[in-house]
Image: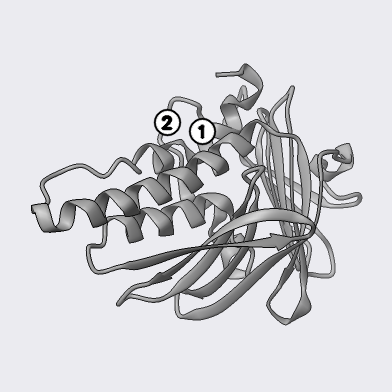
């Protein structure tokens, strides 16, 4: 595994590692279970491979709002921006910024620990504002693959000029559609999460980044809650 991608992989490792569907199924269920697992693993592999890429992706959220995911290597770092907030993950810190008030305030927390089980809770704030992150989508696909009653259908489309594979998932707990580009970038999502309807669609993609994307916004107030020595 390339050293530069280790930190980014840590954010999704536990979810992707959990995608192997094991256990006992009846013979009648075996083919269907294997089909679901193969499809989910294929999309998860794409999302995992994208953790080694450098790219900038712009998205349109529900109501026409804009958001972005930016990722780079050497050193590994990523930034998630949505209306009113931003989350940046680097080897130095996990930084959460509230940009919706009169003054931007950023809180610095400890960076992800590579050997620890990553927490999807890191992305809770982004999800509250409609930005669905790749680890969240992997989690939803995993749940669908393990649901014997789930119906998963595959299709193909083009998003922002890039080919994408889509899955339409119908479950008793809620339906959703997710698309992943050939590069492994999250292309789109539509469904309900935590009782709210959410939509996300890729509007532009480039394999270059602006280094300023990973910096604390100019003039922001800083609250450093990292352990001493971080």
SS at badge 1: helix
Where residue 72 sits: x, y (%)? 75, 34
Contact between marks 1 and 2 (CB within 8 A): the answer is yes
Can residue 82 be spotted in the picture?
Answer: yes
Q: Give the mark, 1 or 2, whose residue is nearer the N terminus.
A: 1
In the image, residue 27 above or below residue 83? above
**Residue that mark 1 sits on:** 10
In-image side of 57 versus 20 (left or right) = right
Where residue 201 sits: x, y (%)? 69, 66
State the image quarter where residue 206 is shown.
Answer: top right
Seen at 73% across and 82% down, the residue is 63
- Quadrant in which the N terminus appears: top right
Seen at 73% across and 24% down, the residue is 75
State the image quarter where residue 163 is shown.
Answer: bottom right
Can residue 97 be spotted in the picture?
Answer: no
**Residue that mark 2 sits on:** 116
Seen at 22% across and 63% down, the residue is 148
- Quadrant in which the C terminus appears: top right
Where residue 165 sits: x, y (%)? 57, 56
Crowdedness near tag 1: few (<14), some (14–19) or many (≥20) residues, C-alpha within 10 Å: some
In the image, residue 198 above or below residue 212? below
Where residue 158 sits: x, y (%)? 71, 61
State the image quarter where residue 224 is shown.
Answer: top right
Q: How many marks?
A: 2
Colour pattern of the rendering:
one colour
In the image, residue 76 above or below residue 34? above
Crowdedness near tag 2: few (<14), some (14–19) or many (≥20) residues, C-alpha within 10 Å: few
Quote the CA–CA distance across marks 1 and 2.
8 Å
In-image side of 81 versus 89 (left or right) = right
18 or 218, which lies in front?
A: 18
167 or 115, which lies in front?
A: 167
SS at badge 2: loop
């Amino acid at each position: 595994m390339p050293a530069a991608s280790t930190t980014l992989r840590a954010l999704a490792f536990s979810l992707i590692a959990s995608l192997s569907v094991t256990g006992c199924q009846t013979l009648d269920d075996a083919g269907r279970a294997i089909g679901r697992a193969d499809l989910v693993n294929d999309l998860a592999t794409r999302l995992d491979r994208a953790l080694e890429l450098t790219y900038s992706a712009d998205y349109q959220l529900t109501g026409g709002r804009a958001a972005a995911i930016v990722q780079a290597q050497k050193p590994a770092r990523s930034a998630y921006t949505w209306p009113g907030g931003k989350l940046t993950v680097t080897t130095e810190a996990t930084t959460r910024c509230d940009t919706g008030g009169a003054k931007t305030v950023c809180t610095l927390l400890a960076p992800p620990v590579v050997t620890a089980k990553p927490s999807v809770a890191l992305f809770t704030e982004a999800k509250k504002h409609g930005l669905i992150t790749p680890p969240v989508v992997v989690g939803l696909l995993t749940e669908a693959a393990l649901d014997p009653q789930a119906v998963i259908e595959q299709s193909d489309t083009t998003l922002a000029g890039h080919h994408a594979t889509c899955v339409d998932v119908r479950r008793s707990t809620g339906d959703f559609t997710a698309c992943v580009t050939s590069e492994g970038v999250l292309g789109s999502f539509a469904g309900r999460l935590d009782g709210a309807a959410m939509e996300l669609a890729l509007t532009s993609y480039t394999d270059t980044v602006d280094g300023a994307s990973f910096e604390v916004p100019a003039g922001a107030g800083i609250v450093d809650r990292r352990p001493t020595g971080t």
